Image (spheres, helix red, strand yellow):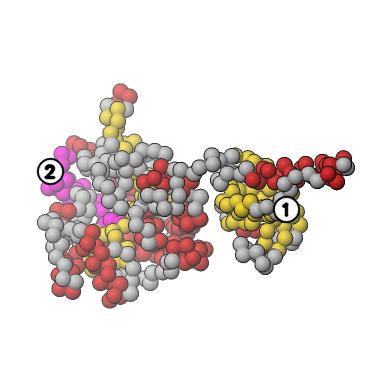
Amino acid sequence: MTHRTLIKDLSALPDGPVTVAGWVETVRDQKKVQFVVLRDESGALQLVNPATREISPEAASDTEGAAAAASALALTESISGLSLGTFITVTGGLKHDERVKLGGLEVKVGTLDVAGASLPEAPIAADSSLDKRLDYRWLDLRQPKNALIFRIQTTLEHAWRTWWVDNGFVEIHTPKLMESPSESRAELFQLDYFDLGTAYLAQSPQHFKQMAQAAGFGKVFEISPVFRADPSFTSRHATEFMSVDAEISWIDSYTDVIDMQEQLLAAGLAAVKAKHGDEIRELFGIEVEVPAIPFPRIPLAEVHEILKNERGYTVPREDGDLDPEGERQISAYVKEKYGHDFVFVTDYPASIRPYYHMRDAETGLTKSYDLIYNGTEITTGAQREHRIDELLANAKDKGLDPAGIGEYLEFFKYGIPPHGGFGMGLARVLMLLLGESSIRETTLLFRGPTRLAP
């Protein structure tokens, strides 16, 4: 492995020899001196080289001098020929100099090795369309702002995993090939599976999370891809995305799930603010807010009343669910009234919830919620129906054939505790945290109805 010093670590070193490596961001090839801005995954650095344009007669007359002059000329020509984006390794002399605007230090080039040359014309620029940038995503991700997204993602996931593990959760990895649909027969990708017939790509780890409750695991989590054959072209939909899921046993109400999720989110955002707050402020113009607990909680029926009476907005949907504008409006109301970026909308009608959401015996409403963050829904959560007779009744009420969910129903025949959980879109959380306009920006390689590459 190439021994190199990351650019971010150079400021702590004394003047002297160093080796750095990265890609060429800019070249200023002046007559007497050459400047190169080198960038690696940690930052940017100025390289400097006194240009040698020709070998003087005096140097040519001396064997040792001629060799040194030839080497200096070759280095100058090599730098002059560098294309932007070329990966290089440089060994030279580190010098701290407060006059250097880029970090107050520079490296005088001693040797330069081209590890991977780039074509001279880049296919994208800073003002290229999003779709064009996604065609060359690996180049787009060299931009510090875009690269930061995935370091933030790493910190967020690590903080979540740490919170879960510290609180006794078990991480599981569920299959993405399924014999029967995990949610419904809508929005399914299917494929031929040997002699067993048709298989489906998992829309959710829902069934397997619940199986873990029947297995007595108690508390589980998973961060994994899920698939939806959804022809939507909105800023928040994808055909493949990372789902953040958790399920817990021995709950008394869906509010136990809410309590767990808000603690998880607060821990994650605190970690992001601590590690990346300054960079996020600089590159995104966003101040990371660590949410106060508890988050506001408002029943759906009350939300409709607030929207109508306080915001002058009536949701046009006939099924009673919120539309995107309704989500934005209730979020704005909560921000103004409570100063909070999150709001749990609770108690949804059974008609717009899956059959496995538990229903309240008195109201008929489901013991479920959506979580809205900065104007967009990021989560659906619920207490699950663990009583098989009620589960069958709910399924039939939805017009489902019990034979089609027979394998799922097996989990409930041999004992299962009261339980509940949630599913949350990772890219949506990042999009809303960073004020981005689309999950295409916060997904490493986006997949949608018209995109299957790179």
Q: Is residue 33 visible?
A: yes
Q: Residue at x 34, y 54 (%)?
A: 438
Left or right of 321, for residue 272: right
- What type is the residue that disc 2 sits on? Gly
Residue lying at the far top in this picture: please name it: 195
| C-alpha separation, residue under disc 1 versus residue under disc 2 | 78 Å
Q: Residue at x 38, y 69 (%)?
A: 291
Secondary structure of the residue carrying numbered label 1: strand
The image shows residue 87 at horizontal and vertical percentages of 60, 44
The residue singled out by tag 1 in the image is 50
- What type is the residue that disc 1 sits on? Pro
Where 294 falls versus 368 (above or below)?
Answer: below
Q: Which residues are magenta?
A: 379-402
Q: Nearer the viewer, residue 432 or 378?
A: 432
The image shows residue 119 at horizontal and vertical percentages of 54, 39
Q: Locate the N terminus and report the quarter of the image it occupies.
A: top right
Determine the image quadrant of residue 17. bottom right
The image shows residue 61 at horizontal and vertical percentages of 87, 42
Q: Nearer the viewer, residue 323 or 364?
A: 323
Residue lying at the far right in this picture: please name it: 62
Q: Nearer the viewer, residue 87 or 214?
A: 87
